[in-house]
Image (cartoon, helix red, strand yellow):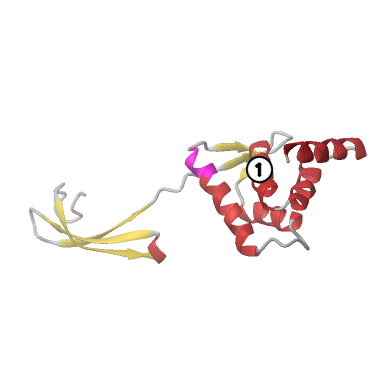
Amino acid sequence: MKCPYCDYYESKVIDSRPTDEGQAIRRRRECIKCSKRFTTYEKIEDIPLVVIKKDGNRQAYNRNKLLNGIIRACEKRPVSMKRIEEIVDEIEKNLFNSMEREITTQLIGEMVMNKLKNTDEVAYVRFASVYRQFKDINTFMDELKKLLDEK
């Protein structure tokens, strides 16, 4: 870390403390050359995630949209808010760990359906009916048959 006083490139860390609820680290440093002290902050670099919609439009990833879609699918079902947030956290972890900067809504939708299939089958079918845009009762029944065959 370059000293702001003498531009020397070596310093030693005197003290480190977490800040911003653990999202950053505040470091007190002392320059090896001039012995002056200064403060630096270290935080994780946020990789902006862009979602590619079905029509090709791109927009910034929005956790609330994902959360609200799952809440709607789980409405009046025995799925706790804690479990819904765990699903969103797991999906986000997978998205951000993939290191891809652009993610399709198709990939996100498939991830949600996989999580809901193991959590609540009714919520899964509800989400799938909106996500896959079932055109008629036959496509809906095909999805139900797939679900039953897996059991």
Position of residue 146 measured from the top left corner of the image (x, y, whole percent) = 78, 36
What residue is drawn where x is 64% and y is 47%?
Answer: 115
Q: Is residue 100 above or below residue 32?
A: above
Q: Pinpoint residue 36: horizontal percent, then vertical percent.
A: 13, 61
Q: Secondary structure at mark 1?
A: helix
Q: Residue at x 66, y 51 (%)?
A: 66
User: At label 1, which amino acid type do we have?
Assistant: Asn
How many dots with numbers?
1
Q: Give the magenta-colored segment's residue range.
A: 94-98
Tell me residue 131's x, y (percent).
76, 42
- Does residue 56 sit above or below 16 in this rendering? above
**Left/right of residue 130 with respect to residue 87 in the rendered view:** right
Q: Which residue is mark 1?
A: 114
Q: Is residue 127 left or right of residue 105?
A: right
Q: Residue at x 68, y 42 (%)?
A: 109
Depth check: 122 or 22 in front?
Answer: 122
Q: Residue furthest right?
A: 137
Task: Say if the magenta span includes residue 96.
Answer: yes
Q: Quadrant of the C terminus?
A: top right
Q: Residue 111: x, y in percent?
A: 63, 42
